[in-house]
Amino acid sequence: GVDTSILNGAGDQRLFATLVGDLLSPCGEPVSVQVCVERNAACSRCRPAARYLARLVAAGADRAEIRELYRARYDDDAVQEIPIDDAPVRGSLVGAPITIVEFSDFECPFCGRVNPTMDQIQEEYGNDVRIVWMNNPLPFHQNAGPAANAALEAFDQGGNDKFWAMHAKLFENQRALTRVNLESYAQELGLNMAQFRAALDNNEHGDAIEAQQALARQF
């Protein structure tokens, strides 16, 4: 089965059930996603596809949008380009043959579990890989949006070094992401506090965060 605990109420459950029952499996068999999940344990694509549909439903996308995003993602002929010019990067800034784009949420405990893997990849492959951060704060994490704003303000003030330092603090303290906490971390990093407070007060990086979330919904 597929964990649907992120779905919000009966309406989300019904929409999810309709989608997995209607959309074709991404593994090439002429069956629905639901049938593939239930009957084809060997398929490596069906369960991730079902989880992807659940995330889209939970994020509030409507049926038509979800269908379009699903087809864009699982059409083998589709090639997606992700603009990363203004995003925080670690690893080689130019020339890396492999780029990993990570869409994540500072308050999400499951997202936090990815960090050791990312660290290991960076350590093992060095300049052959670059890791690009994109914000995707989930709507049911009330502190994730302000944390994303705080991280991008650190990036604005101090580039990649300050961003990744803030990134580390936020993930190390996922249960302490209130406004007071965020200001404390900014002060520890030596950020300009007047600018930092204004950025949070005015949701200064909100447009950038929303643009990154829109990208995340395409995948």
Image (cartoon, rainbow, N blue to C red):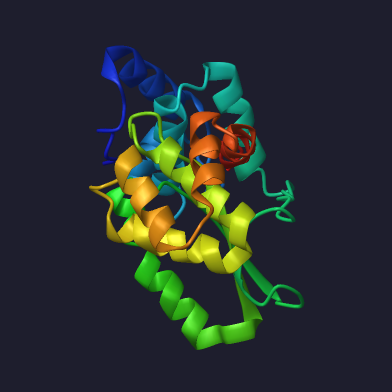
| Whole-percent x, y for residue 30 in the image | 53, 38
Quadrant containing the C terminus in the rendered view? top right
The residue lying toward the viewer, choosing from 152 and 24, is 152
**Point 67% across, 77% down: residue:** 92
Q: Is residue 160 visible?
A: yes
Report how many numbered discs are placed on residues in the image. Answer: 0
The answer to whether 111 is drawn above or below residue 196 in the figure is below
| Whole-percent x, y for residue 70 in the image | 58, 35
**Point 33% across, 29% down: residue:** 140
The image quadrant of residue 10 is top left
The residue lying toward the viewer, choosing from 110 and 40, is 110
The answer to whether 203 is drawn above or below residue 61 in the figure is below
| Whole-percent x, y for residue 22 in the image | 48, 24
The residue lying toward the viewer, choosing from 176 and 47, is 176
The image quadrant of residue 168 is bottom left
Q: Is residue 43 visible?
A: no
**Point 63% across, 53% down: residue:** 156
Q: Which residue occupies the extreme top position in the image? A: 11
**Point 52% across, 17% down: residue:** 62
The image quadrant of residue 132 is bottom right
Q: Is residue 211 left or right of residue 36?
A: right
Quadrant containing the N terminus in the rendered view? top left
| Whole-percent x, y for residue 187 in the image | 41, 56
